[in-house]
Image: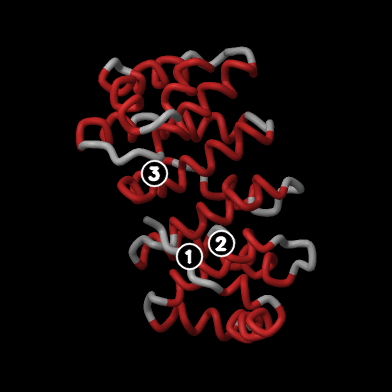
Amino acid sequence: MWTLNNIMADGAEAAEELLRAGFIEVLAHLLELGSMPMSIITNVCWGVLNVSKYRLDLPRLLQLKELLPSINRLLLSVQEEEVVTDLLVAMSNFCEHHLADVVETVNLEKVMCYAKSTSDQITLAAIRVIGSLCLGDEAQVDRVIANGGLEHLQRVLLSPEANLATLREACWALSNIAVGPIRHIQLLIDRGIAKQLIGLLQSHPDACVSIYRA
């Protein structure tokens, strides 16, 4: 797996060769095995992250979708920082094409728990997932809010320990919520988040720079 992942990360041409050879099928098989040494799980999840970064054709996107139940299972059972971070970032990438499937398949409550992790890497990745989910429709954003998404984003804004990258992701997530219906905007006002964003713009203007997702 280490060798395959290094090839996958070498560029689009090398990645395409691995995909044609069935790399996603291998990942799916390994994820379904359940019991594996942590070293193998770590490399498999790195592979999932690598695949999630590429623009895939429809058949491969459908293959990728089939990995979601296994990813959800791992997020519920594994605590290793590298594994959790890779899976959360991959999940955020999955949202570009499979947002509805992520909302329906993944335990959102667990994702929200990761947003208050003691690990800066895990917190950053979880906040990014929240932002990606908030690109969804009104009902999907409602699910995020119902599972505590706004509270976690607000906690980041208020935390003196929050790093710049996490603050930027939180601001991006809130901007996604703010393009929704009036009632979502009213929530941002009623909970004091709009006022906190003004304060953040004064104290940390770099955190309020828009993030463009290619």
Give me the residue at 51% from left, 67% from top. Answer: 172
Query: Label 1 crowding class (10 Å Cα cut-off): few <14, some 14-19, many 20+?
Result: few
Disc number placed over residue 211 in the picture, else none: 1
Dot 2 and dot 1 residues touching (CB under 8 Å): yes
Q: Position of residue 169 (x, y in %)?
A: 56, 62
Q: Mark 3 points at which residue?
A: 94
Indicate which disc residue 171 carries: none
Q: Earlier in the sequence, mark 3 or mark 1?
A: 3
- Residue 125 at x, y percent in the picture: 58, 49
Residue ID at (34%, 24%): 14
Residue 169, numbered label: 2
Q: Are marks 3 and 1 in contact (CB under 8 Å)?
A: no
* In this view, 179 is above or below 15: below
The quarter of the rendered structure image containing the C terminus is: bottom left
In this rendered view, identify the residue nearer to me: 3 or 156.
3
The part of the image, by quadrant, that contains residue 207 is bottom right
Label 3: few (<14), some (14–19) or many (≥20) C-alpha neighbours in 10 Å: many
Residue 44 locus on image (x, y percent): 51, 22
Residue 154 shown left or right of residue 96 in the figure: right
Name the residue rendered at 59%, 45% in the picture.
110
Left or right of residue 111, residue 161 in this image: right
Q: Which of marks 2 and 3 is nearer the N terminus?
A: 3
Where residue 142 sits: x, y (%)? Answer: 44, 65
Identify the secondary structure beneath mark 2.
helix
Left or right of 173? Residue 56 is: left
The type of residue carrying mark 1 is Ile
Q: Viewer-nearest of labels 2 and 1? A: 1
Q: Are marks 2 and 3 in contact (CB under 8 Å)?
A: no
